[in-house]
Image (cartoon, rainbow, N blue to C red):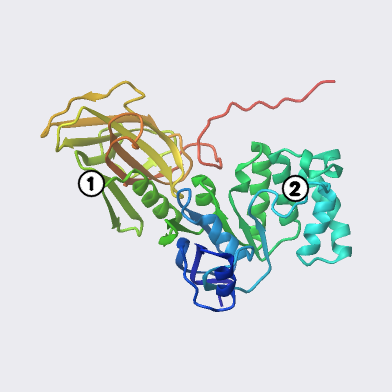
Amino acid sequence: MSLLSVHSLGKAYRSYSSEWQRIGRWFGFSTPICSETWVVRNVNFEIQPQEAVGIIGQNGAGKSSLLKMIAGTLNPTEGTVQVNGRISAILELGMGFNPELTGRENTIHSLGLMGYRSAEIKEIVPDIKSFTEIEEYFDEPVRTYSSGMQMRVAFAVATAFRPEILIVDEALAVGDAYFQHKSFKRIREYREMGTTLLIVSHDQAAIKGLCDRAILLESGLMIKDGQPEEIFDFYNAIIAQKEEKTVEMKKLEDGKVQTRSGTGEARVEEIQLYNIDGEAIQYVNVGETVELRGRIKVYQSVDSLVLGYGIKDRLGQVMYGTNTWHSEQVIRSPQAGDTFGFSISFPANLGIGSYSVQTALVDRDTHLTANYEWQDIALVFNVVNHDKMFFAGSLWIEPTLKIEKSIL
């Protein structure tokens, strides 16, 4: 049985010519509607126990409205939400806090509304204060708090007890980097203990690092549900998409989905990784110098052509990326039929694992002005450790270690 089930969920905001017509609608009368705006429509998905799902989409896509309906703070216009567990939600910053009450008083009040007993609340409040690290401000009115301090208290209250389902909106984007690290550490710990996670964030690294799945919303509609890397590749493609552009998706032999988008004025026709002996390779030793070679073909004359590339880990997080705009190697006025070879030499100072290369052909430093071609998973290679000291992590940063006995 699923822990959370959303069926045909939708939310519309309606206006009427008079309040009497609105009231009549409440009682089931068929009164005329002046205008109707749907912010979420026909959303369907299920979440299983211990699963982590990210919700992504551009501003105004309906992400926050969807979370509010799931959390029960917003009534849907149509559809149902079935929850089989206790939900804890961090939605709008400080939502439900009384600005005239202190952080401590708001904490006690919020936990009471969440259904916890007085003895449980009394026992946990000192831990909440300690986690927030706002010291004496905990006993000051919330109206004196900064947005970061409000987020600290809201997060500490919502995660004081491990919930079965934790819902997090963009609130964690507020505040200092230290507390963001501390918050995500707690979320990861709860995930390992079995908490189901539903999170909205524009932070690709957070979604890819925490989530098993991602759901893409566009104009209130759910348009894609799948692996986070695949969904973000598609999302990045449609952000750059204009009327004449296309988005192509192809399933590769290893099960990954390759996304290719762009207007087609130029394309990367070939790409391969080589070692220093000029041999094509798929396996690379940690720190080994390799060369990425390829060929670009121009199909339509353009004013300028920029090649970009990035190296991504298996979760789709970019390890490194740059382009020829920044290296001041822009190709000026290439003509239809021109071909260009490229080579990129670099040391593979990466951790053990599987990596992919993405390529971009654009007109300047970003793909948002002209996207001739954007290709994710252009090739895949693996990094292995043959001769380096054991290490953990995504990067190889060779240390010089010294340890000596101190003489007092």
Instruction: Find the distance from the CA under tag 1 to the CA under tag 2.
Output: 48 Å
Q: Along the line of sight, which residue is nearer the eye, 381 or 124?
A: 124
Q: Badge 1: few (under 14), some or many (20 or more) residues near its Cα, within 10 Å?
A: few
When asked about the image quadrant of residue 277, the answer is top left
Quarter of the figure with the C terminus: top right
**Disc 2: which residue:** 153
- Give coordinates of residue 312: x percent, y percent: 42, 43
Q: SS class of the residue under badge 2?
A: helix
Q: SS class of the residue under badge 1?
A: loop
Q: Badge 2: few (under 14), some or many (20 or more) residues near its Cα, within 10 Å?
A: many
On residue 69, which mark appears?
none
Mark 1 or 2, nearer chain start: 2
The answer to whether any part of residue 238 appears in the image is yes
On residue 244, which mark appears?
1
Amino acid at the residue labelled 2: Val
- Left or right of 407? Residue 356 is left
Q: Nearer the viewer, mark 1 or mark 2?
A: 1
Q: Residue at x 28, y 48 (%)?
A: 260
When asked about the image quadrant of residue 149, the answer is top right
- Left or right of 249? Residue 36 is right
In the rendered view, tell whether residue 44 sits above or below residue 216.
Answer: below
Amino acid at the residue labelled 1: Glu
- Give coordinates of residue 98: x percent, y percent: 78, 51
In the rendered view, tell whether residue 57 sits above or below residue 360.
Answer: below
The answer to whether any part of residue 159 appears in the image is no
Callout count: 2
- Give coordinates of residue 310: x percent, y percent: 38, 37
